[in-house]
Amino acid sequence: MIRFYYNLAPNPTKVALCLEEMGLEYEPVPVDTRKGEQHSPEFLKINPNAKVPAIVDGDQVVFDSNAILLYLAEKTGQFLPPAHERGSMLSWLMFVASGIGPYSGQAVHFTRFAPEPKEYAVSRYVFEAKRHWGILDARLAERRFMLGETYGIVDMAVWGWSRLVPFVLGEDGFAGLPNVKRHLEEINDRPAAARALALKDRHAFKADMDEAAKLAMFPHLAQKVA
């Protein structure tokens, strides 16, 4: 059985969706990052980068959410495009990994958690987050799913983050992203999405972003403390 190390952040959530869509048996193993559990010696043996998600599948250890999606798709033969569309799949999968996720995450960090002064950082990362989401919206204006009419792992990767567009870009974040919103709502209606989101009821994660949580989540702060 696959061991799935997770919390409720976007990247683990898209892997939960993938596991549910593929009907794979898995054991969810909570990693409470606000308690610093990602820095434990046991977890660092699984992911030296101290981040979730990660999976252990027999003797295979896979970390980074989009790597996990691709691994599971190749393992099962599910939710992959035809061979002639593989290049497009890889391009958009990496676009989410290198653009949507990092810029959205940094936008959240600087708008909600970073101390002042931060005007330059907020301007840069909110702009880049909006720009990347705009590229996705334009893509989805021309097709039902990211690669056409067929749902696949790129859509799962997008869904993990699109659920949080209002948190990333503000309450009106979907105002300029009608196609991303339509795409999100269609995936939300899938039974596997409901099962993936139900993981939130399996374990109570720490909710407070107190000083201990900040040190665990943002290790660079420990240098200032030292």
Image (cartoon, rainbow, N blue to C red):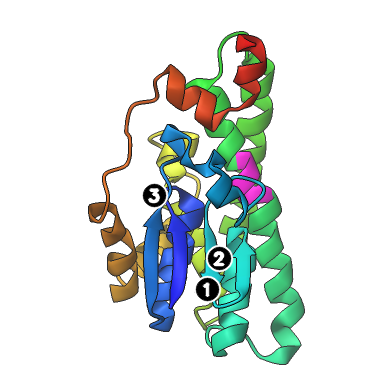
Kindly identify which residue carries mark 3.
8
Could you say which is closer to the camera, residue 91 or residue 130? 91
Residue 162 visible in the displayed image: yes
Range covered by the magenta-colored residues:
99-103
Instruction: Kindly report which numbered mark, 3 or 1, lies closer to the viewer in this rendering.
Output: 3
Crowding around mark 2 (Cα neighbors within 10 Å: few <14, some 14 to 19, many 20+) is many
Q: Which SS class for mark 2?
A: helix
Percent coordinates x, y for residue 43 in the rendering: 54, 50
Q: The C terminus appears in which quarter of the rendering?
A: top right
Amino acid on which the number 1 mark rests in the picture: Phe
Q: Answer whether residue 147 is visible to the viewer in this image.
A: no
Q: Quadrant of the N terminus?
A: bottom left
Disc on res. 145: 1
User: Sequence-wise, which precedes: disc 3 or disc 1?
Assistant: 3
Amino acid type for the residue under numbered disc 2: Leu
Which amino acid type corresponds to the residue marked 3 in the rendered image? Leu
- Label 3 vs 2, first from the N-terminus: 3
Q: For the residue labelled by badge 3, is the local secondary structure a helix, a strand or a loop?
A: loop
Q: Are marks 2 and 1 in contact (CB under 8 Å)?
A: yes
- Is 57 positioned to the left or the right of 47 in the image? left
Residue found at the very far left of the displayed protein? 201
Q: CA distance from mark 3 to mark 1?
A: 24 Å
Magenta-highlighted stretch: main secondary structure? helix
Kindly identify which numbered label has been placed on residue 140: 2
Q: Residue at x 28, y 53 (%)?
A: 200
Q: Residue at x 37, y 68 (%)?
A: 27
Task: Judge the density around disc 3: few (<14), some (14-19), many (≥20) Cα neighbours within 10 Å.
Answer: many
Work out which residue is located at the far front of the displayed protein and give it. Answer: 41
